[in-house]
Image (tube, grey):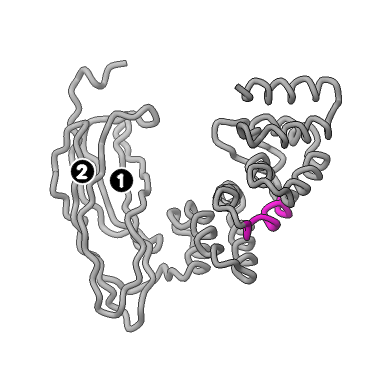
C-alpha cells in the first residue's frame, strides 16, 4: 500500500522543491516497503544534495534505511531508470559503499555487492580497486561480498578480478568434456552434460568452473551466456567431476530458436573446447 505513497512523495516534493524533508519521509517509509525507486528522481535532480542524505542514512539504526543508501544510489538498479550521472562517474557514491561494506546486516551487504557489480559493468578497474581496498581492511564477511560484487567480471574472464580473488587464469588443468549426454534436446527438456577438471600443476589451484551455453539466434549466429557451475580448490593431481542439467524452457527473457547450439566449460575465465547439441522446437512454439 505504501508503493503509491512513495511515488506521490517524490512527485509532489520535487514539484514543490521540498527536497530534504521528502527524503527524510521516504527514509521513514522504507521499512514498510523499500523506497529505492522513489528516491531516484532526487538523485537525478541534484545528486550532490541527495547524497548528503544518503551518507547520513549509512549510520541509521534500521538496516532498511542503511540499505536504501546503497540501493537507491545503484547506477543500474533493475526495473528502474538508470542514474546516468553515476553510470558515467560512480565515485561520488563510493563513500556510501565504504561505510556499509562491513555492515552487520546481510540484507545491507547484499545491496553493497550488487552496487559494486553495477559499477563493474562500466568501470571494471574502479570496481576491482574498490574491492581491493575493502579486502585490505576486511570484516569476516568481506571476501564473500567481494566475490558476489565481482561476479560479472569473473564470468567475463577479467584478469584483474580473477587475480584479486586468487584465481589464476593461466592455471594448469586438464579438462575433459563437456560430454553431452543429450545431443538432441526438445524445448522443455534439460541439456545434460558430464565434465572433469584435473589440477595438473605443482600447487593447489583455486578454480571458478563455469559453463557457457551458446544459444542459436534467429539469424543462425550464436550468442554466449555464462552460467555458474562450481568453485573448488584442487590439490595437485586432484580431479573434480560432475554432471550438470541445464533446463531449456520457454522464457519471457529469452526467445529460443531451433538448431545447433554449443556448450563449453570456462575455468578461471578461460574458455575450453565446446560441444554441439541440437534443440528441437515444435513449429507452433516458434509462432508469436
Would residue 15 appear left or right of 6 to someone viewing this image?
A: right
What segment carries the magenta color? 93-103
Q: CA distance from mark 1 to mark 2?
A: 10 Å
Residue located 50% across and 61% down the image: 144
Q: Nearer the viewer, residue 254 or 33?
A: 33
**Residue 281 seen in the figure:** yes
Would residue 269 appear left or right of 29 to someone viewing this image?
A: left
Q: Which residue is mark 2?
A: 191
Rendering coords of residue 95 (x, y %): 73, 54
Q: Per the image, is 264 magenta?
A: no
Quarter of the image that includes the C terminus: top left
Magenta stretch secondary structure, dominant: helix
| Mark 2 residue crowding within 10 angstroms, few (<14) / some (14–19) / many (20+) | many
Q: Nearer the viewer, residue 179 or 9?
A: 9
Q: Which residue is mark 1?
A: 213
Q: Nearer the viewer, residue 54 or 239?
A: 54
Q: What is the total number of numbered labels drawn onto the structure image?
A: 2
Rendering coords of residue 28 (x, y %): 72, 35
Would residue 15 appear left or right of 68 to someone viewing this image?
A: right
- Above or below residue 41? Residue 132 is below
Sequence-wise, which precedes: disc 1 or disc 2? 2
| Mark 1 residue crowding within 10 angstroms, few (<14) / some (14–19) / many (20+) | many
Identify the secondary structure beneath mark 2: strand
Number of the front mark, 1 or 2: 2
Residue located 73% across and 48% down the image: 60
Residue located 13% across and 49% down the image: 181
Amino acid at each position: 500500500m505504501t508503493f503509491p505513497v512513495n511515488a506521490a512523495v517524490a512527485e509532489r516534493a520535487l514539484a514543490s522543491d521540498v527536497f530534504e524533508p521528502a527524503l527524510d519521509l521516504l527514509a521513514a517509509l522504507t521499512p514498510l516497503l523499500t523506497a529505492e525507486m522513489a528516491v531516484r528522481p532526487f538523485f537525478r535532480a541534484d545528486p550532490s544534495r541527495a547524497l548528503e542524505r544518503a551518507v547520513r542514512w549509512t549510520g541509521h539504526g534500521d538496516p532498511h534505511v542503511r540499505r536504501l543508501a546503497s540501493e537507491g544510489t545503484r547506477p543500474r538498479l533493475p526495473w528502474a531508470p538508470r542514474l546516468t550521472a553515476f553510470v558515467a562517474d560512480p565515485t561520488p557514491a563510493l563513500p556510501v559503499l565504504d561505510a556499509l561494506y562491513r555492515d552487520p546486516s546481510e540484507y545491507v551487504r547484499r545491496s553493497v555487492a550488487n552496487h559494486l557489480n553495477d559499477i563493474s559493468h562500466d568501470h571494471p578497474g574502479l570496481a576491482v580497486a574498490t574491492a581491493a581496498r575493502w579486502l585490505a581492511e576486511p570484516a569476516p564477511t568481506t571476501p564473500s561480498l567481494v566475490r558476489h560484487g565481482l561476479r560479472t567480471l569473473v564470468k567475463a574472464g577479467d584478469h584483474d578480478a580473477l587475480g584479486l580473488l586468487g584465481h589464476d587464469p593461466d592455471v594448469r588443468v586438464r579438462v575433459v568434456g563437456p560430454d553431452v549426454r543429450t545431443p538432441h534436446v526438445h524445448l522443455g527438456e534439460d541439456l545434460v552434460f558430464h565434465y572433469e577438471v584435473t589440477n595438473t600443476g605443482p600447487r593447489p589451484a583455486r578454480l571458478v568452473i563455469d559453463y557457457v551455453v551458446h544459444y542459436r539466434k534467429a539469424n543462425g549466429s550464436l550468442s554466449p551466456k555464462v552460467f555458474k557451475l562450481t568453485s573448488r580448490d584442487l590439490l595437485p593431481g586432484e580431479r573434480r567431476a560432475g554432471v550438470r542439467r541445464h533446463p531449456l524452457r520457454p522464457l519471457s527473457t529469452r526467445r529460443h530458436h531451433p538448431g545447433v547450439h554449443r556448450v563449453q566449460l570456462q575455468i578461471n575465465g578461460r574458455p575450453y573446447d565446446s560441444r554441439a547439441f541440437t534443440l528441437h522446437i515444435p513449429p507452433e512454439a516458434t509462432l508469436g
